[in-house]
Image: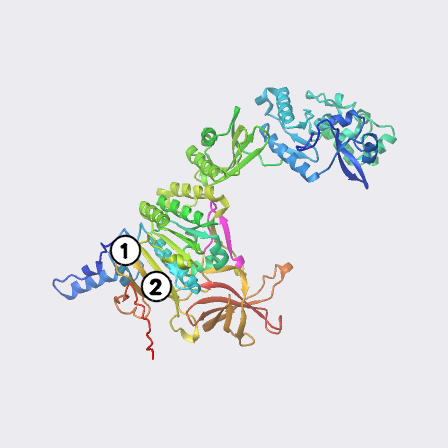
Amino acid sequence: MRRRRQSGAPPLDAPLVVTGDRKGALTIVALDDAAAALGLTEGMALAEARARYPLLEVAQEDPAADAKLMETAAEYGRRWTPLVACDAPDGIFLDITGCAHLFGGEEGLGKDLRARLTRQGFHVRVAIASTPGAAWAFARFGMEAILPAGSERKTLAKLPLAALRIEEETAAALARVGLKKIGDLYDLPRAPLAARFGKALLERLDGVLGRLEEPLSPRLEVAPYMAERPFPEPIGREEDVLGAVACLAEKLSAMLERRGEGARRLELTLFRADGAVFTVAAVTSRPSHDADALAELFATRLDVLRDELDPGFGYDLVRLSVLDADRIGAAQTDLAGPDNAEELARLIDHLGARLGPSRIVRQEACESHLPERAVLHVPVGGVGTSAWKIAGPETPPERPLRLLLRPEPVEEVVAMVPDGPPARFRWRHVLHEVARAEGPERIADEWWRTAESRPTRDYYRVEDREGRRFWLFREGLFLREEVEPRWFLHGTFA
Amino acid sequence: MRTEAIHPAKEALPETAVSPASLRMAMERLARPAADPGSLSLGEAGLDRTLGGGLMRGALHEVAPEAEGDAAAAGGFCAGILVRALSVEKRKPLLWVRHEPATIEDGAPYGHGLAALGLDVARIFFVLAENTNEVLEAMEHALRSATLAAVFGELRGTVKLDLRASRRLALAAGHGATPALLLRLGAGEQLRAPVAAATRWRIAALASADAPVNGLGMPRVKADLIRNRRGPAASFSLEWRTHDRTFRFPALRERLAPPPVGRPHHAPAQAERRASA
């Protein structure tokens, strides 16, 4: 598929070719119908084409933009099936097993797909077959067709060997011995073929004929629960979208309830009539199949994302999927007790929808000597299990209230060598005279992280004359690791 | 301006028969103020009395460091209040709304340090807000839900917090009967603006008690109560006791109930006059 003409291109009647650097020469890599009608072909040198038709409109290829465009098209492909795989540079696989009946059979789906993508400016070739390999071969080398199941062997026989997605050299080598069509391989003994042309050839052949399962690697995970609603007349107003979401949430809720499950991670997909696709994600802090709560989650999220979502001419398909579900009642954090757990979950979900789910976190203690690694920020929803050490009676905290994002160097440090606490230091332009100090507490590098070995740190808790408390460390052992150890401030105490 | 300030200190001691038993009862009541559902006791009787029973639950309380260097001390004071809130509401968690500029400037609240002050870190939800609006919005929403032991927000920078914004918080706090605590760091001149808070505190670090071998003692702060809806303005020296999860007056803690150090509302600026020749 190729978009035939980028917007903003000058006179529509001038034949357009797209060129790229191939083996040091500017070569035509794509062309429009008008250019093809002039007898130009892919692979022709631009100089030659120009010599023939000076009026040619020439554009540079842009592989990155092409790839992005194909990604968009693949995203759009999700309206027909959740199983979409990209086949770079110019193909898309759709696994329509079990989906075709929703669009009036395979023929109906093919027609719908062709019509929609053509309207978006793509030049489309569609083939439907029982194996990805056969569909690929027909989309590129045969006529566009819907192959009835079981007929692949017969219909593919006439196609050239290149249709097997084998390397050019292999195809050329096969041609030299007189093998040109796929059918030529059918009755040959397999072992010599594999020995001479490689195992890949037979694998491709088996894949095309369905003797070998060829898995597609879908771009996105497939949702266990999904509900969608098409709109023959695209909708764009916010309340309409919210209405659709509420209605879909109701459907999902019924499905979830039947299986005793609740949604943990959801995704709303909005298909715009012109091919743009928006996805909005939401998570819940505990499994829920409450339709109102789920709809409200997206209402909040959509409200936040209002500026990013441009309904344009409207959405013609709205889909709500549950990406992760859990048994209701299982794996719940019983933080709030039974009375207001529900309400608390609602609050956390609302805040998550408002600010983004990753911005509501809890802290977990983590086994690490390095202070900055000893705390993990985990998104809510998980079960908090870590035990935090609480100081014994009458011991001042050994760890700071706040830890700086990274240790900050301090200057003008006066300290006794080799391992005395600092008597004075300057941090952020302020000079602090140390009145009390405790330490050192030696924190050595974790030996298993050999890749990024760090010098030893000696930590001191100090209090200055005003009673302000700091956590400082000296990096490196005096004279052993460093000639002149550097001092850093890592945190502040209450 | 509100004028109906209540002075609960007046009804502290009954003036009837003075027997040792009744005196002891009175002393005990002083030491442990009656459990008042509308107030959060800070654990030190004298402090609670000045506050009219403790920090008002459904109200906003503002805490700010006296100088830039006292930010950590102010944070520690807030942490102490949060420990108190969690120990009263044993089934409810706590929401801590972080402000991105505060994280950059002052660092992130550190679980091990919070635990060392007695905070149950497993019961804290942290909200990572990027700007003032997000902080205020998250706080307001959380306060309304009435599912939390306390809501704590931090704001860093010369953020203009007008009466309207703070009143919204105060109303939300009243709605859910949840204490709202706001720590304002680096607010500078903006702190002079009126705020719809039940109490306003200015916190400074205080040198800790002498410990053996030059070590550090328990954290101490000087807490200036510059606005108090239910009592007079006052200034306290407070020491945090992790083990008892309570604030104590440090120097006088052996005595039963030391009176708060009174402080005039407006210290008269004494301009020194120079005699001109």
Q: Secondary structure at mark 2?
A: strand
Which amino acid does the dot numbered 1 rest on? Arg
Which residue appears at 58% of the width and 63% of the height?
A: A445
Q: Is residue B234 above or below residue A148?
A: below
Question: If you read the primary sequence from the N terminus, does the residue marked by circle 1 or circle 2 appear first?
Answer: 2
Q: Nearer the viewer, residue A12 or A84?
A: A12
Q: In which quadrant of the rendered image does the C terminus of chain B lie?
A: bottom left
Q: In which quadrant of the rendered image does the N terminus of chain B lie?
A: bottom left
| Magenta region | A372-387
Question: Furthest residue to the front?
Answer: B277
Residue A241 at x, y = what percent? Answer: 48, 30
Density class for disc 1 (Cα within 10 Å; few <14, some 14-19, many ≥20) is: some
Q: Chain of mark 1?
A: B
Residue B146 at x, y = what percent? Answer: 35, 45
Q: Is residue A459 above or below residue A356?
A: below
**Which residue is label 2 attached to?**
B223
Q: Nearer the viewer, mark 1 or mark 2?
A: 1
Q: Quadrant of residue B157?
A: bottom left
Q: Is residue A386 above or below residue A268?
A: below
**Residue A67 in sight from this viewpoint:** yes
Residue B77 at x, y = what percent? Answer: 38, 60
Image mark count: 2
Which residue appears at 16% of the width and 63% of the height?
A: B22
Q: Secondary structure at mark 1?
A: loop
Question: Furthest residue to the left?
Answer: B17
Residues marked 1 and 2, same chain: yes
**Residue B150 in sight from this viewpoint:** no
Q: Which mark is residue B229?
A: 1
Q: Is residue A475 above or below residue A273?
A: below
